[in-house]
Image (cartoon, helix red, strand yellow):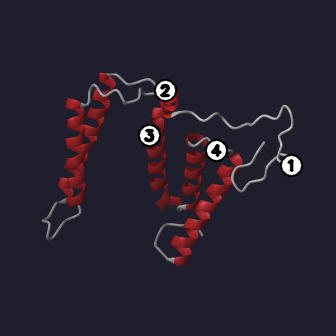
């Protein structure tokens, strides 16, 4: 097998390929062939009902965020209170959800819900669990578990890389936030 630029080559010193030698590289595809291949591999499109349902979920979350941010107080642009920026962000979220609900129902680019559609929900639930556990047992163990779940089960990494990278990430956070910056983040050690 031949290496890329600057890489080593499995060809003999003379540079001539032995008979029967075959490149392992895929054929170069034209843009049209590549677009056709992507079209074949694309997941099935969601229908109008799925598009409407996802828009309604975003709309509900946006309205809930509007109410909560308003309850925190908006203030004025000169003297903003904690709810001002979440309120403005929620307004944009509601507007986009309404736009998608009215004009985006027939969008053909939206993907059908599959088993992998639950991956963001899994990420959100595990992140919420980590935040809930941090005041009780510190950030080290919840962070390690979160990294393992995200890398192994959501990212399909090998156990070796999952455990190694997770340990390095937690150690780096500990070094930065506890040792170097001396923040008040809850920690065990």
Numbered mark located on residue 157 in the image: 4
Quadrant placement of the C terminus:
bottom right
Q: CA distance from mark 1 to mark 4?
A: 40 Å
Of the image marks 2 and 1, the number of the one nearer the N terminus = 1
Query: Residue 97 vs residue 36: left or right?
Result: left
Return the residue nearer the eye: 177 or 8.
Answer: 8
Density class for disc 4 (Cα within 10 Å; few <14, some 14-19, many ≥20) is some
Query: Residue 15 vs residue 103: left or right?
Result: right
Q: Is residue 188 visible?
A: no
Q: Is residue 109 visible?
A: yes
Of the image marks 2 and 4, the number of the one nearer the N terminus = 2
Numbered mark located on residue 36 in the image: 2
Q: Is residue 103 above or below residue 8?
A: above
Q: CA distance from mark 2 to mark 1?
A: 40 Å
Return the residue nearer the eye: 134 or 97.
Answer: 97
Determine whether label 2 and label 4 are within 8 Å by CB.
Answer: no
Q: CA distance from mark 1 to mark 3?
A: 57 Å
Quadrant placement of the N terminus:
top right
Q: Which residue is mark 3?
A: 121
Numbered mark located on residue 14 in the image: 1
Instruction: Measuring from the top left, give residue 46's x and y in whole percent.
Output: 37, 24
Density class for disc 3 (Cα within 10 Å; few <14, some 14-19, many ≥20) is few
Which secondary structure, mark 4? Answer: loop
Instruction: Measuring from the top left, give residue 11's x and y in whole percent.
Output: 83, 45
Query: Residue 11 vs residue 68: left or right?
Result: right
Of the image marks 1 and 4, the number of the one nearer the N terminus = 1
Name the residue: 20% across, 54% down. Answer: 88
Of the image marks 2 and 3, the number of the one nearer the N terminus = 2
Which secondary structure, mark 2? Answer: helix
Query: Residue 8 vs residue 57: left or right?
Result: right
| Mark in the foreground, 2 or 4 | 2
Name the residue: 61% across, 65% down. Answer: 171
């Amino acid at each position: 097998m031949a290496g890329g630029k600057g890489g080593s080559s499995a060809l003999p010193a003379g540079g001539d390929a032995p008979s029967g030698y075959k490149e392992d590289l895929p054929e170069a595809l034209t843009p049209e062939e590549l677009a056709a291949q992507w079209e074949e591999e694309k997941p099935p499109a969601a229908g109008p009902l799925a598009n409407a349902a996802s828009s309604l979920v975003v709309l509900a979350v946006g309205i809930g965020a509007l109410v909560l941010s308003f309850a925190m107080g908006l203030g004025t642009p000169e003297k903003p209170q904690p709810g001002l920026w979440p309120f403005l962000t929620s307004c944009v979220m509601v507007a986009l959800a309404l736009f998608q609900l009215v004009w985006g129902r027939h969008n053909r680019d939206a993907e059908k819900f599959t088993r992998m559609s639950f991956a963001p929900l899994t990420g959100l639930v595990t992140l919420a669990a980590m935040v809930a556990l941090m005041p009780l047992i510190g950030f080290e163990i919840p962070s390690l578990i979160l990294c393992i779940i995200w890398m192994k089960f959501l990212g399909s990494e090998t156990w070796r890389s999952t455990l190694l990278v997770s340990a390095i990430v937690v150690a780096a956070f500990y070094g930065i936030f506890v040792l170097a910056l001396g923040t008040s983040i809850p920690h065990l050690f």
